[in-house]
Amino acid sequence: MIGNFPNQELGASILKHKTLPIYEATSFDFFRRIPFIDVFYEKSMIELHCGNLRMNKKGNRYSDIFPGQKVSYWSDSPQTAQAEYYRWHHSKNYITFWAYDDGSSYIPTVYPPEPLYIIDGRDIGINKIIRKRNSDLNLDSNEISIIDTIAYKHPDCLAYESEQRKGGINYLFFEKGFKKLSLRQVSLRLGEEPSNNHNKIICADGSDYTPCFKGYCGMFLPKTKIRYKDIGANTDESDIIRMKMQVALDWAERVCEK
């Protein structure tokens, strides 16, 4: 089933469950676009990224499909992320997160590095369920059974068709899977500004996604200027960055020993 997901690197490994559309796979890119608001200024990239995981509650998309779960919405490409963005938002000021599954990196920052555990909802009618809930229609017993089956399998994420871009795929990440994601790049565009309206911060570089920890400390300033925080500060985000750095260093030493 190689090539089943358009945002997976060609030739990357993929394993499929015998009877269910469940895959263990690596080497993915994911994209998420949200409106940029002023409170995002002077927030580090790691802090902004952590904010992408939110409690699924009333008022959020598909809030009652997986009640009580923390979730994050991603897309398979910048084009799909853009189409989804303009479905829900109208602001020309937005920030785009480009993430990858950390376990596929030559130098992972999450230990132990693991493949993603993906349920392909395209094969089991998830889009129909999403459309019904968007229209406030009740699910039938079979659809409820599908949702329960997904929850009991504890996947990292659920793939489903984009309703806004033909051929595009969206991913609903649960907390377990979200922790397997690391940032490659975060870009800011202030489309309502006439000039100097875009910039980006690199958090991983190269084809093997080598982490650039300076990028995780980066933050945007008005208007799209960049500054880097001192990770020596005693904050939750600096602790996360130091932990990622230590995992990467330990992994690099292990590779060199081989």
Image (cartoon, grey):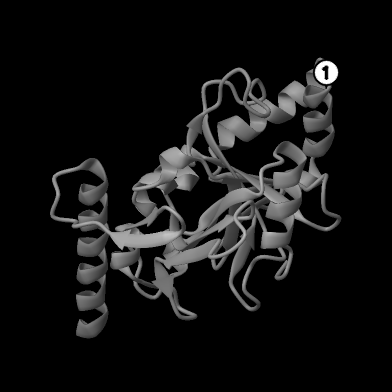
**Which residue is located at x 65 percent, y 77 percent?**
10
Measuring from the top left, give residue 66's x and y in whole percent.
Answer: 61, 26
Asked whether, in this view, residue 98 is left or right of residue 92, the answer is left
The 10 Å Cα crowd at callout 1, few under 14, some 14 to 19, many 20 or more, is few
Asked whether, in this view, residue 58 is left or right of residue 250, the answer is right
Measuring from the top left, give residue 28's x and y in whole percent.
Answer: 58, 64
| Quarter of the rendering occupied by the C terminus | bottom left
Kindly tell me whether residue 15 is visible in this rendering. Answer: yes
Asked whether, in this view, residue 173 is left or right of residue 175, the answer is right
In the figure, residue 173 lies in which quadrant?
A: top right
Looking at this view, is 241 or 251 the one in front? 241
In the figure, 145 relative to 244: above or below? Answer: above
In the figure, 220 relative to 141: above or below? Answer: below
Asked whether, in this view, residue 170 is left or right of residue 157, the answer is right
Residue denoted by label 1: 140
Q: Secondary structure at mark 1?
A: loop
Measuring from the top left, give residue 180's x and y in whole percent.
Answer: 44, 53
Question: Residue type at mark 1?
Answer: Asp
The single residue placed furthest to the front in the displayed view is 194
In the figure, residue 226 lies in which quadrant?
A: bottom left
Kindly tell me whether residue 24 is visible in this rendering. Answer: no
Measuring from the top left, give residue 11's x and y in whole percent.
Answer: 63, 78
